[in-house]
Image (cartoon, helix red, strand yellow):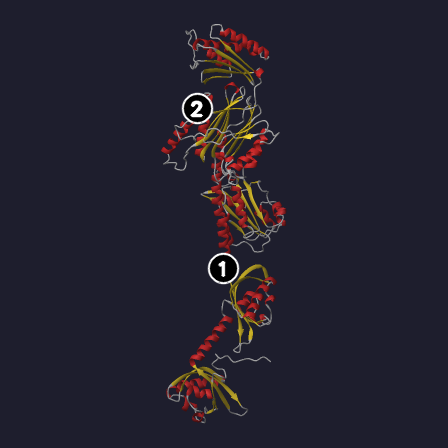
Amino acid sequence: MTRFHESPEDPFSVGNSASAVLDHRGTVVGWGDRAEALLGHRGADVLGRPALDVLVDPADRERITAATAACLRASGWFGVVPVRHRDGRRVTVGVRARRVTRGGPDCEWFLVGAPAQDVIQWETDRSVLDGLFRRAPIGLSVHAPDLSILRVNRAVARIGGITTEQARGRTTGDFIVAADTETVERGLRHVLDTGHPMIFTEQPCRLLSDPSRIRYVAVSAFRMEDSAGEILGVTQLVEDVTERERARLRLALLNEAGARIGTTLDVTTTAHELADVLVPELADCATVDLLDPVSRGEEPSQDGFGPVRRTAIRTDTPGAEEALHPLGGLISFAPETPQGRCLAEQTPILVPELRTPEDLDVVAQERAERARSLGPHSVMMLPLAARGLVLGLVTLWRSRSPEPFEEDDLTLAGEFAARAAVCIDNARRYTRQHHAALSLQVRLLPGELPELPAAEIAHQYIPAGAVEGVGGDWFDVIPLSGARVALVVGDVIGHGLDAAATMGRLRTAVHTLAELDLDPDEVLSHLDDLVHGLAAEQEHNSRDFPLDQVTGASCLYAVYDPVSRCCSLARAGHPPPAVVTPDGKVSFPDLPAGPPLGLGGLPFEATELELPEGSLLALFTNGLIQIPALDVDAALDRLSQELARPGCRLDELAKAVVDALLPAEPGDDVALLLARTRMLPEHCVATWTLPADPRAAGRARTLMADQLSAWGLDELVFTTELIVSELVTNAYRYAGGPVTLRLIRGPRLICEVSDTSSTAPHLRRARSTDEGGRGLFLVAQITERWGTRYGREGKTVWTEQLLP
């Protein structure tokens, strides 16, 4: 048998209330101890006397009479009335009156009373309790210790789609899916076991009647106990916070999108980031289609229409990618399709429900049969527009998630699309500028290298990563007279278009200086003056372009002669080259460092090395050895190991060096130039020294003709006689010393005439009345190239002719 205890707060409980009994005439026939305590009248003073005379003030008789009439009509009454205390003052008392029948013709009235303020408070509390169950918008459910439902209020009943009476005696699992029921009951049991209340704990709540719709509720619970401390059960308050939770999730998703979209300046990567944010949080499948020019970094058309390229796909639905247009493919949307309207009108399109297969055919524009098998039921399309340009559109599908898209989803997706569009446009603009800069840089570098008798050449040029942009590294291979070759690598300090443009100017200057056949130290001196002047010029323009400042450059210039096997080198603040002898030994010659270009006025010093035939000369910029993961010494050791690899083709060796030393995205440009030296055989070079007399030209023609016949070049004898006669005669006339004639047979026939004079011959057009001046013009017409170079003790005039 269950025992119930009176609440100490109930003013009408037996222990708290004052009681009295009146007969049918209104005479007091019963008087309780609590009545005496409340009103001061002893039982002996009031028993047998009319209540109106003893307990009612004359001024209140009318009011009491009206209450008595109402009590008689209803056989009971409850209200607040004034009662006279023994000391004469009026006491406001809450009274309940009930008719009592003893079996006779007359009845009696049982009255209980309590101080009015206690009664009013009690009734207020009861009204609040009644409001919680009947009118409160917050759900309330009361559970027995076994968690069966004792009572629910109307708010909970509405959520469950039942009446309050239908819930009584049932369990939470009769209305909520099993997984959510377990969460609810686990929390209630914890409250029952510990007595610690649960406060605003958010949890999912899916009803068995509509399991596809996810609700979120905030639950608070407390344990119920009677006045003796016996556990009666647990009460929980349930507030539907679905909209608030969705708003929180949307805000969190927006914050996440801000961090995840636009991490790079790459159009494709940004499109994939957008799709990754949308799936699975908002959609089951998302595709990003960009107008074809945008995917290449170009400016889209102003009308925002044209073929789009499928740039990104993200899906959680198996088989979806096979049902959609393939990644990278071109798609043309007709203007009347939803996609066409979305692009042309820059208007988001929401289709909450695809009711028929025809709806899917119209909206999907994909591979209809396969797409239909995936069961998509809701779709959204949003334009990607930024700075007045339409860049493409993003399409979102729901197939596995049963809830259709809503207007709030369209708004949220619009925020994502707006952010992504700005990032894509930034990436597009950067891509266009970066491609332009790279194109400029590549065009400033040498194209296909010529076949040279002096050396076999291979090279590698690796531009810096996207973060650094283009740089000023360059290399060059310049054929020189006498079958020689100039090898150049250089590095303009800094990155960007200005560094690339400066690199182009320096490369042009090097070509000009190389044509003059200057020694390496002289070339660097002239380059130093040029860089110094460029820096002063840019400093003057720094107000307009404060970030584009070239502060200097480094350079290594080498000239190799395949006849003498001599290599002359000079460097300006640049790493020395690596030399690999035919037996595989690697060294880094100790060349005088020289100051970087641009300091102005400081000397440079050249060094000569004699290289055995088949030696490998490796010139490189500092990006190859200044790697974050390695110190310079370790990088040089690794470079030495790679260069010493035997039996490797030169182009393969160049790639192997770069792959071994550089990370996937180097932070600086890298230029690597490899040259495997050759030596012209002795039988391909003929040299004679002729005395300074009038017969020198005839002697030179005879020697030349004999040598060409020995080489099997009789077809070139006539033209070479003209060349030799002109050059030797000029040397005899203007030099006044011995003349040296040298013939070199390589890919071309080279003829050189050296004398002790430093006076340069000049090509001029002779007038009809002139007796001379036509010889050098004739030489220029019958040769492929000709020129003059200067040495320490004179000059050399040289020509080149194509072999038959």
Which residue corresponds to mark 2? Answer: 522
Q: Position of residue 397 (x, y in %)?
A: 57, 50
Q: Is residue 300 visible?
A: no
Which residue corresponds to mark 1? Answer: 244
Categorize mark 2 by other alpha carbons within 10 Å: few (<14), some (14-19), many (20+).
Answer: some
Say which of 570 and 308 sits in front. Answer: 570
Q: Position of residue 407 (x, y in %)?
A: 50, 54
Under tag 1, what secondary structure? helix
Q: Residue at x 50, y 79 (%)?
A: 7
Q: Residue at x 42, y 79 (%)?
A: 117
Label 2 or label 1, whichever comes before in sequence order? 1
Q: Residue at x 45, y 20 (%)?
A: 516
Count of labels shown? 2
Say which of 663 and 185 sits in front. Answer: 663
- Against 246, is 798 above or below? above
Say which of 42 and 398 sits in front. Answer: 42
- Against 425, is 174 above or below? below
Q: Is residue 256 visible?
A: yes
Q: Amino acid at mark 2?
A: Glu
